[in-house]
Image (cartoon, coloured by chain):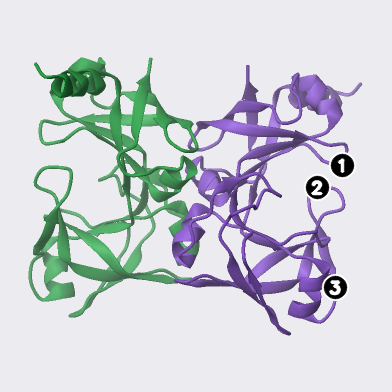
Chain colours: A green, B purple
């Protein structure tokens, strides 16, 4: 085993790489048709296998403001979801609840505007609860289970311990901590920074 | 001693109230003259004795964007300072270093625009390092000293432990934790929330 490989193995038993997620939108197939006149088309793959940044972009409108050219992630989902930070919420005039992805019941709505049409969402705007995507192998290695809530220390410019970090285990995942931009900036995150799950 | 008073005393030995500071600007007397045609005039007092929110507001311009109607805090200082979050920095196109207030050497500049004139700052844009303002009495009670770096647990919607929190002791201070809006949103801060200095 080469030193690089050994280093990598030791590192992967201690540290988890951090990623910051900017504001983004998930839409259904029907909504993609309305907004863009066709289904989503992949621009580049994301860290989670099968997920991609679409070529298509939308304007997200709230009662107080809007964001243009917001990223749309594919593939299409069964239900629309708009993931923003609490800071974004102030700009839009929307107070998103802090939720896990997919949990949009009774969340506030927003209006999506595409080049071909408009979709009014009755619900779907959330701030993503910080979470760790993990492969089953990595979960076993770290001794954590799906849905377990852990504390995570960040090795960043402005170090913090994030509490209430939810572990999500799935063979389709790659192992990454997902923070929103409020959290990323609060800890001074830079690309490649690492975190450690506290015992 | 009434129960309320007892509760207050016990609380004040354990908890410190959190405050979120929005983006704001400090200017010199000379700069206030250029920007507004007169010195700063108080609008309302801030939590720190003698400090006030001024009636006057400025536009802060960076290479990529601007913020209008930015709060100016008085009284005037010996050197200008623009305190923004890292999120704000992305909007402006400025990367502020994380510094204690007053430490602006070699920080980036910005342009301030007032109703009467323009001031180009060569330096002065920082992201405020999270800190705790403390009276000497409270510092003695918590067993901390001026410039000591502590860890602070937040009792908030999205609890975190902030590391590298600097204690600043001064008889002119009231005791409050000061966070910027990235930090406030990352921990889900609401007015009145409390933190605890960890041993």
At horizontal 37% and vertical 44% (from top left) the residue drawn is A190
**Residue A109: horizontal and vertical position, in percent?**
35, 62
Disc on the earlier residue, 1 or 2: 2
Chain of residue at mark 2: B
Left or right of residue A180, residue B121 in this image? right
Mark 3, mark 2: which one is toward the viewer? Answer: 3
Mark 1 and mark 2 in contact? Answer it, CB < 8 Å.
Answer: yes
Q: Which residue is mark 2?
A: B48
Q: Distance between the Cα atoms at labels 1 and 2? A: 7 Å
Mark 3 and mark 2 in contact? Answer it, CB < 8 Å.
Answer: no
Label ID, residue A55? none
Which quarter of the figure is the N terminus of chain B placed in? top right
Visible residue check, residue B4: no
Q: Which residue is mark 3?
A: B39
At horizontal 74% and vertical 78% (from top left) the residue drawn is B35
**Residue A28: horizontal and vertical position, in percent?**
15, 60
At horizontal 14% and vertical 67% (from top left) the residue drawn is A32
**Dot 1: what SS?**
loop
């Amino acid at each position: 085993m080469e030193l690089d490989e050994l280093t990598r193995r030791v590192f992967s038993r201690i540290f988890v790489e951090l990623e910051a997620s900017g504001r983004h939108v998930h839409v259904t197939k029907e909504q993609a048709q309305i907004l863009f006149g066709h289904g989503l088309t992949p621009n580049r793959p994301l860290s989670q296998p099968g997920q991609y940044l679409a070529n298509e972009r939308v304007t997200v409108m709230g009662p107080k403001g809007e964001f243009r050219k917001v990223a749309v992630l594919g593939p299409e989902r069964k239900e629309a979801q708009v993931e923003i930070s609490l800071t974004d919420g102030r700009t839009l005039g929307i107070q998103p609840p802090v939720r896990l992805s997919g949990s949009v019941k009774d969340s506030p709505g927003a209006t999506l505007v595409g080049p071909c049409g408009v979709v009014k969402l009755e619900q779907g705007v959330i701030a993503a609860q910080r979470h760790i995507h993990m492969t089953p192998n990595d979960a076993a290695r770290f001794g954590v289970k799906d849905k377990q809530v852990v504390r995570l220390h960040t090795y960043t410019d402005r170090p913090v311990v994030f509490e209430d970090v939810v572990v999500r285990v799935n063979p389709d995942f790659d192992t990454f901590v997902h923070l929103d931009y409020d959290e990323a900036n609060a800890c001074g995150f830079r690309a490649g920074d690492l975190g450690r799950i506290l015992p």
